[in-house]
Image (cartoon, rainbow, N blue to C red):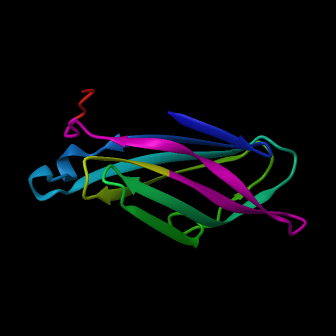
């Protein structure tokens, strides 16, 4: 698991390679990632936008921006958390994802919360030290 904290907002991510949805012979690899966003602060916040930077093992980069996550803009009161699972396909057997969420406080202040960089690993990646 991977974790980061920004302004008392803790983001935890667990990636999972989906062998049953992947087709290595066709350069198609799929991962799910489970995210938990926890408000450990003393102010209510609402998730407004997301940003992802996905880099595959060949160096190709995709950027994804959009409102909310999985179709919602969750509101998190102090002590509350929100969890969701999403996924991403790659045409390479491994990669890395990193990103941020834009949150808004009850007072209307918007701020960025880091999503920790996490590795997308599959058993199909050939790694050679020499």
Q: Residue at x 41, y 55 (%)?
A: 55
Q: Most extreme residue toward the left, as rendered?
A: 25
Q: Which secondary structure is most common in the magenta stretch?
A: strand
Where is residue 25 shown, x and y percent of the image? Answer: 9, 53
- Where on the picture, by quarter, is residue 103? bottom right
Q: Residue at x 27, y 40 (%)?
A: 122
Q: Residue at x 19, y 52 (%)?
A: 22
Where is residue 39 shown, x and y percent of the image? Answer: 74, 45
- Where on the picture, by quarter, is residue 110? bottom right
Q: Nearer the viewer, residue 59 or 30?
A: 59
Where is residue 8 shown, x and y percent of the image? Answer: 78, 42
Q: Most extreme residue toward the top, as rendered?
A: 129
Magenta segment range?
Answer: 98-126
Q: Nearer the viewer, residue 58 or 65?
A: 58
Where is residue 64 shown, x and y percent of the image? Answer: 49, 68
Can you say whether 96 is above or below 54 in the image?
A: above
Q: Residue at x 59, y 64 (%)?
A: 50
Check residue 118 for magenta coloring: yes
* In this rendering, position of residue 123 left or right of residue 107: left
* In this rendering, position of residue 77 left or right of residue 85: right
């Amino acid at each position: 698991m991977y974790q980061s904290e920004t302004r008392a907002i803790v983001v935890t991510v667990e990636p999972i390679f989906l062998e049953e949805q992947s087709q290595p012979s066709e350069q198609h690899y799929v991962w799910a990632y489970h995210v938990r966003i926890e408000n450990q602060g003393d102010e209510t916040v609402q998730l407004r936008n997301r940003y992802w930077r996905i880099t595959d093992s060949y160096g190709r980069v995709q950027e994804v921006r959009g409102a909310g996550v999985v179709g919602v803009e969750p509101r998190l009161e102090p002590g509350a958390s929100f969890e969701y699972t999403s996924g991403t396909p790659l045409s390479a057997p491994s990669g890395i994802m990193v990103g941020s969420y834009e949150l808004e406080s009850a007072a209307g202040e918007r701020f960025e919360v880091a999503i920790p960089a996490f590795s997308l690993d599959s058993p199909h990646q050939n790694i050679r030290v020499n």
